[in-house]
Amino acid sequence: MKKTKILVLTVLVVAFFFGGKLLSGNAVKVTEGENPKVFTSADKEIESMEQTGEDAGKEDSYKEIFEKLADCYAFNQLDEARRHWYADIYTVLSGRLEEGDLLQSQIGTLNPEDIDAIFQCVMNDHPELFYVEGYQQLQHTRNEETVRIVFRGMYSMDDQEARIRAEQIELYVDKCLQGISSDASDYEKVKYVYDYIIENTQYLLEAPQNQNICSVFIGQKSVCQGYAKAMQFLLERLEVPCTVVLGTVEDGVGHAWNLVQVDGEYYYVDPTWGDASYRTGEGMEPADGPSVNYDYLCVTTEQICRTHVIDNVVPMPLCTATAANYYVVEGGYFPAYDEEQVAAYLEKIQSRGQDTVTVKCADKATYDEFYKELITNQSIFRFWDVEDGILAYTDNKEQLSITFWLLEE
């Protein structure tokens, strides 16, 4: 008996969440000559401090710190004055110090209001600062002029707990990186980490520590900021430049993703939007389809901005390269509908034993032609032998892609 071939549309319900507000700080102004009792929004008492008025020897220590920070994306986008305060803030947070003075000679060039953006730059560059939950700044004034600024780190755990979590993180990282070859290309490293995070993490809005890497590496549940920081942490271990990008998606919802550098060219990567457990929404089972969506692996500025709005603390580069785009590398990128190219591509996918295939179109006209031929006219069955199952599909109109996969009867 001849079996009927069925093509069904599976709709993936996209749910957009953001796991919490960005880290920030609160300021306390201390006027010289006074000794007031002041309280932060967290109701923690801060005592005023004596103003030193000195930067004794500090300038000499910056050269070594700057060399250490040379590969940090956000740091490199800052001017000299902001780099000094970045270094001061990084020194406090990385050493888990209680406090430290910001370089006094930059007061006037910079304002206390600049601290929040500089702090965010530090956090975007350093996913290893998982124990940081915010900061406080103490501002000393004389005759209404700021003469000293003290930066205080706020930590979510004590030193012992931080050490325990760091050890747990290393166990995860070691296990993860065992699966990647030492001679892997930059593209292979990025794809491997993208796949690994998605396959081993569940999107969960209420995940503990969801604004840092602990949620991914220890709890295996996180939100966008956790995904992005985990991606950054792992790629930095593999010596692939990566930073966190902040912005919004539909309805102005806050979101975080990544900027990576592959073979000298910049691309955007969004592991959260590549995860089916995110795209189907919390409390819903993912459709019986692919768990990984490659529409957000190594894409251009134009492609990411179809669904994302970049609102980062420092400027982002214009990404135009396509050589490391997933579909370009895998042969699934189509500038036009070409039956021979389609047949060769699907034959390659099936020869690998894969039951999922995605075609990526260069423009809307090509996408419309693919949709008409493969779905409306059901030409997909001429290229894909479906004898013992049902072929399902979903389309992404924003990213101009169509995905097919085989369902068991």
Image (cartoon, grey):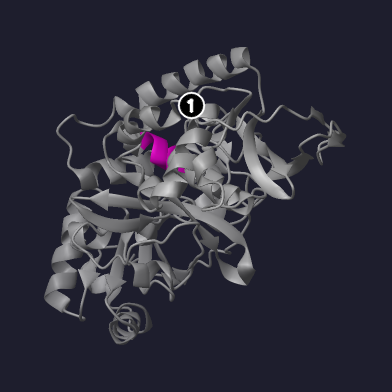
> Which quadrant of the figure contains the N terminus?
bottom left
Relative placement, left or right, of 104 versus 303 is right
- The kind of secondary structure the magenta stretch mainly shows is helix
Image position, residue 70 (x, y; %): 30, 39
Instruction: Identify the residue at horizontal 28%, vertical 57% (top origin).
Output: 266
Decide: is 202 above or below 368: above
Instruction: Identify the residue at horizontal 54%, vertical 49% (top origin).
Output: 224
Q: Nearer the viewer, residue 98 or 399?
A: 98
Image position, residue 109 (x, y; %): 51, 53
Residue 388 visible? no
Residue 53, by quadrant, is top right
Image position, residue 251 (x, y; %): 63, 71
Instruction: Identify the residue at horizontal 32%, vertical 32% (top origin).
Output: 63
Q: Residues within 10 Å of mark 1 (few under 14, many from 20)?
A: few
Residue 114 visible? yes
Q: Which residues are magenta?
A: 229-234
Badge 1 is on which residue? 56
**Magenta span has 104?**
no
Q: Nearer the viewer, residue 402 or 392?
A: 402
